[in-house]
Image (cartoon, rainbow, N blue to C red):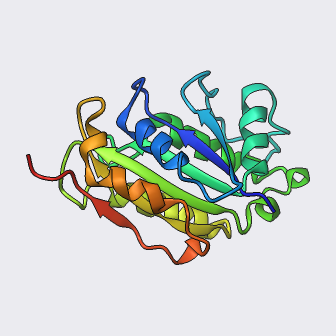
C-alpha cells in the first residue's frame, strides 16, 4: 500500500525553520510515498468547545478537511517550533478537536488511527537538549494512547529564518522518514554545530 505522509505544520511564522525542516525531509520520502500538507494556521481552526457528555457531531468545513486528511494518512508528521517548552497554540487546538472526534461513534476514530505512524520535527533557539522533551512526551503519549506507532522525533536548533539549513538536523532529516520499522526509532537530538 502506498504510504501517504501528512505534514501538519504549526508555526505562526511564514517560512519558519520547522516548516523548512519538514519540507527538506519530504524530499527524501520512501519510494512511491506521497506527501500532503496542512498548515494549521491558515485558515485558522475554530475554537474548541468540550460538549461532553453530548456528541459534538461530524466535523464540517475547515475541521472536516483536517479530519479527512488525518484519517486518510498512513503517516502523520507534526512540524512545529518549541515555544515556552511546548507546542504553538494551533497544534494544541488540533489535538483538542481530535479529542472531540473520539466522542462521535460513527467516525470510528480510534479504529482508523490505530497503527498510523507519528513523527515529530521541532526547532528551537535554546540549545539545551531538554527543552523539547515536554512537547515530545505530550505527542508520544497521545499517539501511544490512541494505538498509533510512535516513529520518533528530530529536534533542530535554529533561531533566525533559514538558520536550520546549517544545523545538523538538516542532514538527519534526509533519512528520518525513510525507516521501514519506524516504531523502533529513537528520538534524535541534533543541535546546530558551534560557530
Instruction: Name which residue lies at 40% across and 68% down.
Output: 187
Relative to 54, 85 lies left or right: left
Instruction: Name which residue lies at 66% across and 35% down.
Output: 49
Q: Position of residue 177 (x, y in %)?
A: 53, 59
Does residue 187 sit above or below 78 in this rendering? Answer: below
Does residue 172 sit above or below 166 in this rendering? Answer: below
**Along the viewing direction, whichever of 79 and 146 lies nearer the viewer:** 79
Relative to 130, 32 lies left or right: right
Does residue 187 sit above or below 35 in this rendering? Answer: below
Q: Residue furthest right?
A: 106
Residue 88 visible (yes or no)? no
Instruction: Name which residue lies at 79% across and 40% down.
Output: 56
Does residue 74 sit above or below 95 in this rendering? Answer: below
**Along the viewing direction, whichever of 179 and 148 lies nearer the viewer:** 179
Q: Quadrant of residue 7?
A: top right
**Along the viewing direction, whichever of 93 and 65 lies nearer the viewer:** 65
Amino acid at each position: 500500500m502506498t504510504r501517504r505522509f501528512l505534514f501538519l505544520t504549526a508555526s505562526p511564522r511564514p517560512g519558519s525553520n520547522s516548516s523548512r525542516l519538514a519540507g527538506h525531509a519530504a524530499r527524501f520520502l520512501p519510494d512511491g510515498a506521497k506527501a500532503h500538507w496542512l498548515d494549521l494556521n491558515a485558515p485558522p481552526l475554530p475554537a474548541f468547545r468540550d460538549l461532553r457528555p453530548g456528541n459534538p457531531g461530524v466535523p464540517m468545513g475547515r475541521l472536516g478537511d483536517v479530519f479527512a486528511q488525518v484519517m486518510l494518512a498512513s503517516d502523520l508528521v507534526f512540524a512545529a517550533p518549541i515555544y515556552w517548552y511546548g507546542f504553538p497554540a494551533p497544534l494544541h487546538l488540533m489535538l483538542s478537536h481530535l479529542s472531540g472526534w473520539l466522542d462521535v461513534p460513527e467516525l470510528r476514530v480510534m479504529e482508523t488511527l490505530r497503527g498510523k505512524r507519528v513523527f515529530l520535527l521541532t526547532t528551537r533557539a535554546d540549545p539545551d537538549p531538554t527543552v523539547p522533551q515536554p512537547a515530545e512526551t505530550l505527542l508520544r503519549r497521545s499517539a501511544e494512547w490512541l494505538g498509533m506507532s510512535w516513529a520518533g522525533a528530530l529536534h533542530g536548533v535554529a533561531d533566525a529564518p533559514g538558520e536550520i539549513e546549517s544545523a545538523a538536523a538538516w542532514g538527519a532529516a534526509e533519512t528520518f522518514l525513510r525507516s521501514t520499522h519506524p516504531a523502533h526509532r529513537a528520538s534524535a537530538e541534533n543541535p546546530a554545530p558551534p560557530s
